[in-house]
Image (cartoon, rainbow, N blue to C red):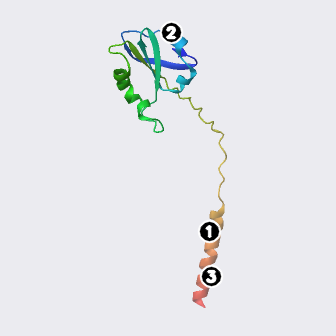
Amino acid sequence: MAILSENYTVVKEFRTVFNPEQFNEKIVHVLLKYDFIVGDFADDHLRLKGFYRDKRRDVDMNKKASKIEKYINESCNYMCPHYVLEKIQVTPQRKKPRRNYKKRPKKQAKPQQAEKSQGVEKSQRVETATSS
């Protein structure tokens, strides 16, 4: 479901209370920075609270996803209807780099012939030096 240009999915729903229209009316842009959004009903009013993924190190421990159950148990009414939404992580697809498939002609090395001729000259020098 698309909500204010962000994609979310329902992870947990207790007493089937999620209503997209009501959520869209209540959501604030500040909450869009969170990876998880918890919605609970107290006195027929929707309350929203955001949480980050556990992998993030730069946030308070009470704002991490592992504390969602603690928040529901301690801050919400007993057995109140609630739901948890998770932001879908969309990774952009990388374009593969274009390769140049044109084959370049291989350079044929002619130094082998030069080495042979130099080798003959060196061996002749050695022979002349030993014979004299």
Query: How far across and down, in percent of the image, does residue 92 sit?
Result: 56, 29
The residue depicted at 38 percent of the width and 12 percent of the height is 81
Residue type, label 3? Arg
58 or 46: nearer the viewer? 46
Please give the name of the residue rendered at 65% of the width and 63% of the height, measured from the top-left corner: 111
Q: Secondary structure at mark 1?
A: helix
Q: Are marks 2 and 1 in contact (CB under 8 Å)?
A: no
CA distance separating discs 3 and 2: 99 Å
Q: Residue at x 52, y 8 (%)?
A: 21
Amino acid type at mark 2:
Gln
Instruction: For marks 2 and 1, give the CA distance.
Output: 88 Å
Residue 62 as seen in the image, left or right of residue 105: left
Residue at numbered disc 1: 116
Q: Which label number is shown at residue 125?
A: 3
> Where's residue 58, x and y in %?
48, 38
Sooner in the amino-acid sequence: mark 3 or mark 1: 1
Mark 2, residue position: 22
Image position, residue 89 (x, y; %): 50, 26
Q: Amino acid at mark 1?
A: Lys
Name which of mark 2 and mark 1 comes first in the sequence. 2
Q: Earlier in the sequence, mark 3 or mark 2?
A: 2
- Image coordinates of residue 72 in percent, x first then y, are 37, 21
**Residue 43's image quarter?**
top left
Q: Are marks 3 and 1 in contact (CB under 8 Å)?
A: no
Q: Residues within 10 Å of mark 1 (few under 14, many from 20)?
A: few
* Label 3 crowd (10 A; few <14 / some 14-19 / many >=20): few
Between marks 3 and 1, how big is the CA–CA gap?
A: 14 Å
